[in-house]
Amino acid sequence: MKKFKLLLVASLLAIVSMAFLTSNINAREAERVALNEVQGIPANASVSSEWAKYYPRQYDSWKRTKEGDEMEDLLKKKPQLPVIWAGYRFSIDYNSPRGHYYAVQDNVNSLRTGAPVDDLTGPFPTACWTCKSPDVVRLMEEDGELEYFTGKWARYGSEAVNSVGCLDCHNPKTAELAMGREYLNRGLEVAGLPRFEDATHQEKRSLVCAQCHSEYYFKKTEYTDKAGKDQTAMVVTLPWHEGLTAEGMERYYDSIDFSDWTHKISKTPMLKAQHPGYEIAKTGIHYQKGVSCADCHMPYTQEGSVKYSDHKIGNPLDNMDRSCMTCHRESEDKLREIVHTKFERKEFLMEISMDNLAKAHLETGRAMELGATDEELKEIRTLLRHGQWRWDYAIASHGSFFHAPEETLRLLADASEKAQQARISLVRLLAKYGDAQYMAPDFDTKEKAQTLAGVNLQKEIEAKMKFKETLEKEWHKQAKAKGLLDEANRKDVDLESSYFKKK
Amino acid sequence: MLKPNKFLIFSALGAFIFAVGMFAYTVHASKALSYLSSDPKACINCHVMNTQYATWQHSAHFGNATCVDCHLPRGDFVDKYIAKAVDGWNHSVAFTLQSFDHSIKISDDGARRVQENCISCHASLTSTLVSNADKYHTFDDSSVDTGRRCWECHKGVPHGKVRGLTTTPNNLGVKEVL
């Protein structure tokens, strides 16, 4: 009897383990077959979860951009910033970026976007939604590009409700890479580069990112709308007319007398670099060797039989095995150390240039108090404008220290040099007006720096909180009624900002 | 009504027969017998090797050498099947549990085998090289630890310089199957 008991137990064990094994094998085979099948077309393409039915892995990995939830108050970390940006809304609130999953909410929560009370209140134009949501692609198609770029930011509060997603980079019919923002093609054209449609697939894997990770400004454009009314659109425009370099863009901005704002302390007409990630990356060795943004930030990955591109866009160092190690043959630790050293070098020069720029603004302010004339300050202000532009251009796209370390350090050194030149002239000027010993006041905390910059933070926060209780709630209600809002994908997005923590 | 011991005998035999049938099915589903062949398509049964298959297929080695010609010991039947069994076991565990690295690296033992096979196929070439340049290379030493490997210089042979899934960006699914 014992023999049969043993046989029974052994057979059952064998059956169970083989059942697991065959189901695993068959599942892989089914994946392989499914992968080669034609996919369907998502119905409501600006809602990313609609794509999930056909591209479940891409969608799931996109959703994991939610894990990039760390937010750092950069004004606190680098208190030179409020002084450098005095008079501009960046001096009020500026945080490290979170994952794509949070783009819409972070735009809404930022103190920079102010506290509108209706569709017509500012401070910013509709252009501020442009890179936050696939709904923008839909709106540009429905309303026309010029109509989209007309009016105040708050106008589309109930329309731009889904965060950066599928439709931003893909054609819903074919799922091929696509560009939903025509201004990129206009930028490529003025730069003498091939249009998106004429680019190679590998270039497209960077160009879809360049739609947003680029330098831009809002160009005033007059037009007559459908109702025959004269309107002014503020159109996102890439300043690539003189090339994709910091100096080229500076020449272009100077030639059209453009300034983003006038500095509150030094009264200098300033430029604010947005995030020239694409332009800087193009000067770096990886791009020049033919590596696209997606190669490192969306590396190919394998799940069972299925190979796909990882849509959890973030730091490539989080999965070096799939990003770096496909080409590099050193150890992960060694590569990580190299990247870290690049970062340290950038931090070193960045701190110096920021200190010099901030002090130069304050010293200019003091010279003005003492009676220095605009004529006397003309050259100093040009140095400040150009120096700060270079510093901002070098660091605004975050990854530049890695994408193009030499270019980043070159720009930071040049920024420092220009700020120092300004400060030498300022010492002379201050001496002329009897205050050669002037020392710029401390700005070693966010509070001190914001006081110098004339920021009333409390007032901004109060207004924003009121907005969040009223108009923002109204936006949600309307978006839900229109069937635009995918509430599951707005979960937990509103737990943190620089001025509140609900976690 | 069956006596308890008879019930045990019948169910034990029944389970055994079922297990045998199931085993046959597993052999069929996993294409287990294909692993006894030297057809390169057997190596992409598990889909992870698609990249290696595709890069080999477009290389100069295609038509001259198959996967096993480079990767398994040649000549010695016993060595070959031991290597096959060990590799096969490691591969199937890694694939079933999905525990492998995405930039697959050759094992030391595998590297030794490939090096030996490079030399054995390209014997006349390597012997000339050895006689000319034995100060720089130790081709006659088959141990990987001390000798330099052929592909340290011939980086693109035969799989391309980029390793991992990036090598074949458009190769999303297996089209060729056994």
Image (cartoon, rainbow, N blue to C red):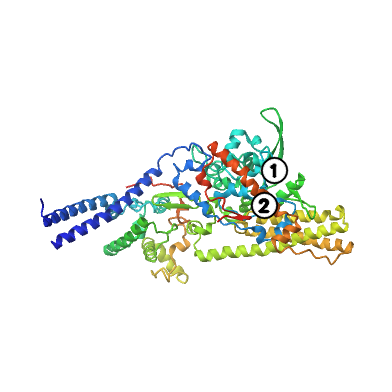
Establish if A476 lies above or below B142.
Answer: above
Between the C-alphas of marks 1 and 2, the distance is 16 Å
Q: Amino acid at mark 1?
A: Gly
Query: Foreground: A165 or A120?
Result: A120
Note whether residue B102 is visible: yes
Q: How many residues crowd mark 2 within 10 Å: few (<14), some (14–19), many (20+)?
A: some
Query: Foreground: B132 or A305?
Result: A305
Q: In the picture, which quadrant includes the N terminus of chain A?
A: bottom left
Establish if A404 lies above or below A107.
Answer: below
Please tell me which of labels 1 and 2 falls first in the chain: 1
Q: How many marks?
A: 2
Coordinates of residue A279 in the picture (x, y in percent): 63, 50
State the image quarter where residue A455 is shown.
bottom right
Coordinates of residue A222 in the picture (x, y in percent): 72, 35
Are the residues at dot 1 and dot 2 in contact (C-beta closer than 8 Å)? no
Task: Assign a secondary structure to mark 2.
Answer: helix
Most distant residue in the top direction: A228
Note whether residue A274 is visible: no
Subunit under mark 2: A
Task: Assign a secondary structure to mark 1.
Answer: loop
Left or right of A181, for residue A219: right
Query: Foreground: A302 or A47?
Result: A47
Question: Which residue is tagged 2?
Answer: A461
Subunit under mark 1: A
Question: Which residue is tagged 1?
Answer: A122
**What's the residue at 52%, 41% (across, down)?**
A47
Q: How many residues crowd mark 1 within 10 Å: few (<14), some (14–19), many (20+)?
A: some
Coordinates of residue A135 in the picture (x, y in percent): 57, 40
**What's the residue at 40%, 40% (across, down)?**
A37
Coordinates of residue A22 in the picture (x, y in percent): 29, 51
Establish if A38 lies above or below B41.
Answer: above
Left or right of A443, for residue A66: left
